Amino acid sequence: MKAKKIIAIFSSLLLAAAMTGCTGRIYTEDGSPISSAPVQESSVAESSVEESSEEESSTVESSEEESSAVESSEEELSEEELSEEESSEEESSEEESSEEESSEEESSEEESSEEQAEGLKITFVKPEEWETPVHAYVYNDDQKKNADWPGEEMTDNGDGTYSYVLPKDKVEEITSPQVIFNAGTKQYPRSGGLEVTDGTTYETE
C-alpha cells in the first residue's frame, strides 16, 4: 500500500510538473491550481524594456545629430560674418586710398594754380664746374627784361638745381620771353636764349 501511494504521489508530481511547463500553472494533487507563473508576461515586459531602450538611444542619436547640425550652422554663419567684415575692411581701405589720391591731386592742382598766380616758374640744373650764384636773365626781342645783366638771382634748391619765378607783372610785360642762365663767366646757352615755358627744367647739353 505504501509503495502504491508513493508511486501515485510521484506520478502526480510528474503530471503537475508537465502541466506547469505547458501552461505556467502549478496544480495540487487533486488538480486545482496553486499559483500562476507569468512567463509570457515577463517576456513581453523584457521586450518592451528593450524597445524603450532602443527608442531612448535613437532619441539621443537624433539629439546629437541636431546639435552637430546647429554647430555646423553656427560655424557657417561665423565664416560668413568674417568674410563680410574682411570685405568691409577692404572697401574701407579702397575708399581711404581713393580719398588720399584725390587729396594729393587737389593739393598738386592748388600748388600749380598758386605758381601760375605768382608767375612762370623755371628750373636750371647747374653744372658742377659753374660758380654761384646762378642768375636767370629773361628778355624778349622788344628789349623787355626782368633785370639788367646778369638778371635775377635764382634760388638754390639744395639738390644741384636752381629755380626762378618770373613775376606775373613781368609775364604780362615780357611777351614771348627767352632766358639765359649764367654764373660768373659761364652762361647757357652761349648765344641767343631759350624759350621760357612754365614748369620747365633746363639742363646744359
Image (cartoon, rainbow, N blue to C red):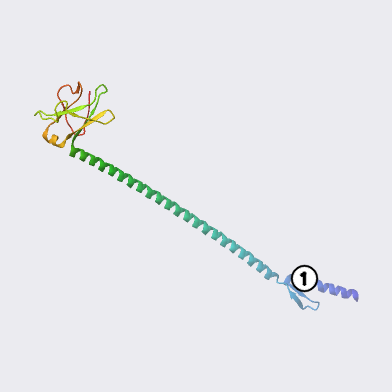
Question: What residue is at 42 percent from the left and 53 percent from the top?
Answer: 81
Closer to us: 32 or 71: 71
> Where is residue 178 shown, x and y percent of the image?
15, 29
Quadrant of image for the N terminus: bottom right
Question: What residue is at 20 percent from the left and 27 percent from the top?
Answer: 135
Q: Secondary structure at mark 1?
A: helix
Quadrant of image for the C terminus: top left
> Where is residue 138 shown, x and y percent of the image?
15, 29
Residue type, mark 1 in image: Ala
Q: Quadrant of residue 112?
A: top left
> Where is residue 185 shown, x and y percent of the image?
20, 20
Closer to us: 8 or 74: 74
For this view, does 7 lie left or right of residue 133?
right
Residue farthest right in this picture? 1
Closer to us: 134 or 80: 134
> Where is residue 124 shown, x and y percent of the image?
23, 28
Question: What residue is at 23 percent from the left and 40 percent from the top?
Answer: 111
- Residue bearing the label numbered 1: 18
